Image (spheres, rainbow, N blue to C red):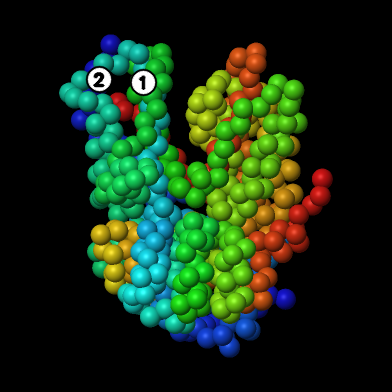
Amino acid sequence: MKEINVARIIPIVKKLCVDANYYASPDVVERIRYFMEKEESPTAKEILALMLENHKMAAEEQMPLCQDTGVALVFVELGQDVHLVGGDFYEAVNEGVRQGYQDGYLRKSMVDDPVIERKNTRDNTPALIYTDIVPGETLKITVAPKGGGAENMSEVKMMKAADGIEGVKDFVVDRIKRSGGNPCPPVVVGVGIGGSFERCALLAKKALLRPLTEQHPDPKWAQVEEEILERINRLGIGPQGLGGRTTALAVQILAMPCHIASMPVAVNVNCHVHRHESAFVE
Amino acid sequence: MAKELKLQTPLTTEMLEKLNVGDKVLLSGIVYTARDAAHKRLVDLLQAGKELPFDPVGAVIYYVGPAPARPGKPIGSAGPTTSYRMDPYAPALMDAGLKAMIGKGPRGQAVIDAMIKNKAVYFAAVGGAAVVTAQAVQSARIIAYEDLGAEAIRELQVADFPVFVANDVRGNDIYKLGVEKFSIDD
């Protein structure tokens, strides 16, 4: 049994919020460079170059890559042999978010009531926290700030088994086609398949966390990802929707078992900034 | 063929008639920031026959909710937000004299029709290149709705702010034309 005082979590979450917003992930930089080489539209090439320049300037100026510094999504992998002491774990995570967004000059984008009041909470809390219990005595925290524009283009569909893999591919491609320039393409497409209505949406979000330069470990899904990506990049939407070959940087799938009557599929769209930072709490 | 040119606010019909979709524009002068919440208040004022907090004639509205400025800087990161959310309000503002909007993503047909009618244009800024766009902002001050925080209306003085013509005064739409040009049928 390992004891961790929740007070130690606060500065770690704070730093993750700031770093995720200031520093472009190396996998994103690599994918944008790769597609920029192949891009045929001069305007699209210019926009992709501007995105790479933005990565450099954000780090130099210590400014967030995008003004939409997102809802603070926090994924926790908690070892079952860890004993958290010293207070409320979720409150500690929220305090880290509060401090990161305040001291890091990040935008506060959360409203308290989703429909009627819609008053800004002014500190970007509450964070959206998802916890998995895992073997061992480590505590891993990932912060993935998620912007509104891309999130709004996401969708869950309860498909039929008869729709098959072609039905899944068509749904994902059509979702990106209908999104056009709205989600800040080139996008990263997270796809969750199986589980249930709510689980497939979470799978789609977690699928986004895999490094863009890594293949799906199962060759049959790697093949599906590649086919969908190729079809999306034939749509012509291009960077920012102004036309071009680079509409998506990657398609990433997470699949799991489901009910004999069901085939739930979720598409979670992420923008090209695609932020995520992880750390272990020692 | 797309061209690159410079424009200075306030904008006139004569200036905008020269623009075609795909052209790159370096915009200088004054732009006003407004997002969802501010738009609702502006259109409420118009419907009540009251004056807006800025002169809409020849004006440019930038759909942005900037990040907080570091001390000594005029503004934080400031890229465009998705524009379709402002579609319900945009025609009324163009009828009041608004000449250009800056945002990202396609507009609805009612907004495009209002652009044709009022000889106005829609510019696309590069979303997610928010530090680059912030460098074009020389000064910023809140002129209305401070209670809205990031969504308050700010008057920005910009120099060579890089944007692309997404809808011109003739109703052309880059979100249709650009995609048609580069799509490959399966």
SS at circle 1 = strand
Q: Which element type, helix, strand or loop, lies under badge 2?
A: strand
Q: Residues within 10 Å of mark 2 (few under 14, many from 20)?
A: some
**Residue B171: percent from the left, percent from the top?**
66, 72
Determine the residue positioned at 74% across, 25% down.
A164
- Looking at this view, name the residue that lies furthest to the left: A86
Q: Which residue is mark 2?
A: A84
Q: Name, please, the residue furthest toward the front.
A: B48
Name the foreground residue: A281 vs B35: B35
Against B112, residue A148 (above or below) is above
Number of marks present in the image shown: 2
Q: Position of residue A213 (x, y in %)?
A: 59, 38
The residue lying at 72 percent from left, 76 percent from top is B1
- Pinpoint residue A215: horizontal percent, then vertical percent: 63, 32
Q: Nearer the viewer, residue A18 or B184?
A: B184
- Image quarter (top left, top right, bottom left or bottom right) of the C terminus of chain A: top left
Q: Earlier in the sequence, mark 2 or mark 1?
A: 1
Visible residue check, residue B80: yes
In the image: residue A138, left or right of residue B146? right
Q: Residues within 10 Å of mark 1 (few under 14, many from 20)?
A: many
What amino acid type should be assigned to the residue bearing mark 2?
Answer: Leu
**Closest to the observer, B2 or A257:** A257
Point out residue B141 in the picture as x, y percentages from the top left corner: 29, 72
The residue furthest right is B186
- Is B89 placed above or below A142 here? below
Say above or below: A255 vs A273. above
- Given the image, what chain letter belongs to the residue carrying mark 2? A
Closest to the observer, A170 or B2: A170
Q: Is residue B89 left or right of residue A5?
A: right
Check contact, mark 2 vs mark 1: CB within 8 A: yes
Q: Which mark is residue A78?
A: 1
Q: Is residue B15 left or right of residue A63?
A: right
